């Protein structure tokens, strides 16, 4: 009896092992089934995507057109790339508010219906001109130019912030402002301070960037910069080194000079074309006003011409205080004397003098800047030939 029981127990154990093996096999088959099912779904999705891609590639190409007018019944007048104009319907998936004259659209090849709105054709270089962050320069950081600040605020800031004042008085505000003067006197700082106060989009262009290799490219860039300014309004276009494209026209047989003149004529047309009370203002800056073409200086383009001269004695004192306000100064620093010995220096020179004075203190491992450091900096930056002692008559120690 005991032998039979042992045999029975052995059979039961084998059956249990076989059951566990079959159960594990069943679990693996279930996992494989789920995996194969997910793969089937993924492949079906990929097949559908490829089929739609094939259909898209087989579909006829769309025509490019430009909207000329929007009719009251929802239809639009478009000018196709081939030339003629058509009155067509628009797709129900297009927002009617986005359909404006001048908008580039895609047209169905058979019905010429508007099926899509295309992005602007602006050169990517134009978008690079826009300064995304508002300049952090304020009027308090500009010394010795109180009269110039007042004039540029009247010409640029007031028409943008309070246009009704000019409407009530019945006058047109200046369209543009031209800043001229020696390098380093603060022309760019003035433009940045105005952009800061008006919270306007600041578009900075160097005149030489309008000079392009191919015929018509420079004029197109000028046109697209003004178009971008209108789209980003309120905005300020600051054209630095204006003399690069606005020099006096001369009889020249070279194609390069003729192309620069075409670019300037496009700039003149754009300056004539926008509203003085609008939200787009133009500020030009140049070091050589004597070589500018008379056409760009006439009223109606740059209406206000502001000279930015080298700072006066009082102005140099203000600039020294502005650039040294974060410096640890010794008690012997005399701004009046520094202003006296830096006659003819520009604001950029004074800034360099303050930086060099700080470097002299760092070189000697001191925590404060002394008058002697400033004197050495003056001699270094302005390249004075006389000894430091001769600048005041007494050698500083």
Image (spheres, rainbow, N blue to C red):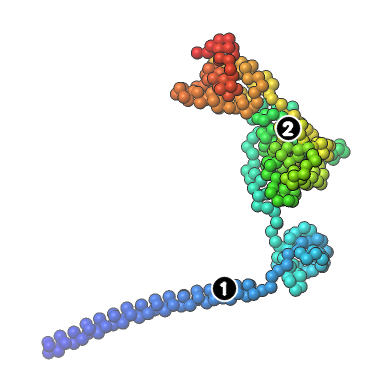
Disc 1 target residue: 49
**Observer-nearest residue: 43 or 198?**
43
Q: State how far apart marks 2 and 1 are (Cα).
A: 62 Å
- At 78% from the left and 37% from the top, the residue drawn is 248
Residue 133, x across and y down, in percent:
62, 43
Residue 140, x across and y down, in percent:
66, 29
- Residue 324 lies in quadrant: top right
**Dot 1, crowdedness within 10 Å: few (<14), some or many (≥20)?**
few
Residue 48, x across and y down, in percent:
56, 76
**Above or below for 205 versus 190:** below
**Above or below for 308 versus 228:** above
- At 55% from the left and 12% from the top, the residue drawn is 389
**Observer-nearest residue: 73 or 57?**
57
Q: Which mark is residue 168?
A: none
Q: Secondary structure at mark 1?
A: helix
Of the numbered discs 2 and 1, the one sitting upstream in the chain is 1
- At 75% from the left and 29% from the top, the residue drawn is 307
Disc 2 target residue: 288
Q: Secondary structure at mark 2?
A: loop
Residue 43, x across and y down, in percent:
50, 75
Residue 65 appears in the picture as rendered = yes
User: Which image quarter holds the N terminus?
Assistant: bottom left
- At 65% from the left and 30% from the top, the residue drawn is 184
């Amino acid at each position: 009896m005991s032998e039979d029981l042992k045999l029975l127990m052995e059979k039961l154990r084998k059956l249990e092992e076989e059951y566990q093996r079959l159960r594990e096999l069943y679990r693996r088959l279930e996992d494989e089934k789920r995996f194969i099912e997910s793969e089937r779904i993924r492949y079906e999705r990929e097949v559908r995507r490829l089929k739609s891609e094939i259909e898209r590639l087989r579909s006829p190409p769309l025509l490019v057109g430009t909207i000329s007018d929007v009719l009251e019944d929802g239809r639009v007048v478009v000018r196709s790339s081939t030339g003629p104009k058509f009155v067509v319907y628009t797709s129900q998936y297009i927002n009617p508010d986005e359909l404006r004259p001048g908008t580039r659209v895609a047209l169905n090849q058979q019905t010429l219906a508007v099926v899509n709105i295309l992005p602007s054709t602006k050169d990517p270089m134009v978008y690079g001109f826009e300064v995304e962050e508002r300049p952090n320069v304020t009027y308090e950081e500009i010394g010795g130019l109180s009269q110039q600040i007042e004039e540029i605020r009247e010409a640029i800031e007031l028409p943008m912030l309070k246009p009704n004042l000019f409407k009530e008085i019945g006058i047109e505000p200046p369209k543009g402002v031209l800043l001229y003067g020696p390098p380093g006197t603060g022309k760019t700082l003035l433009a940045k301070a105005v952009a800061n106060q008006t919270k306007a989009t600041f578009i900075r262009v160097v005149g030489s960037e309008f000079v392009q290799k191919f015929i018509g490219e420079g004029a197109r860039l000028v046109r697209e910069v003004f178009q971008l300014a209108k789209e980003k309004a309120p905005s300020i276009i600051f054209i630095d080194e204006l003399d690069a494209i606005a020099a006096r026209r001369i009889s020249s047989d070279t194609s390069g000079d003729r192309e620069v003149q075409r670019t300037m004529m496009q700039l003149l047309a754009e300056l004539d074309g926008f509203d003085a009370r609008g939200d787009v203002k133009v500020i030009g800056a140049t070091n050589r006003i004597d070589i500018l073409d008379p056409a760009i200086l006439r009223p109606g383009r740059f209406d206000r011409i502001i000279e930015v001269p080298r700072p006066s004695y009082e102005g140099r004192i203000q600039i020294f205080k502005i650039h040294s306000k974060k410096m640890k100064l010794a008690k012997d620093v005399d701004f009046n004397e520094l202003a006296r010995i830096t006659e003819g220096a520009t604001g950029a020179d004074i800034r360099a003098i303050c930086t060099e004075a700080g470097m002299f203190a760092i070189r000697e491992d001191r925590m404060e800047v002394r008058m002697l450091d400033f004197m050495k900096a003056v001699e270094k930056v302005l390249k004075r030939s006389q000894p430091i002692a001769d600048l005041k008559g007494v050698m500083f120690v």
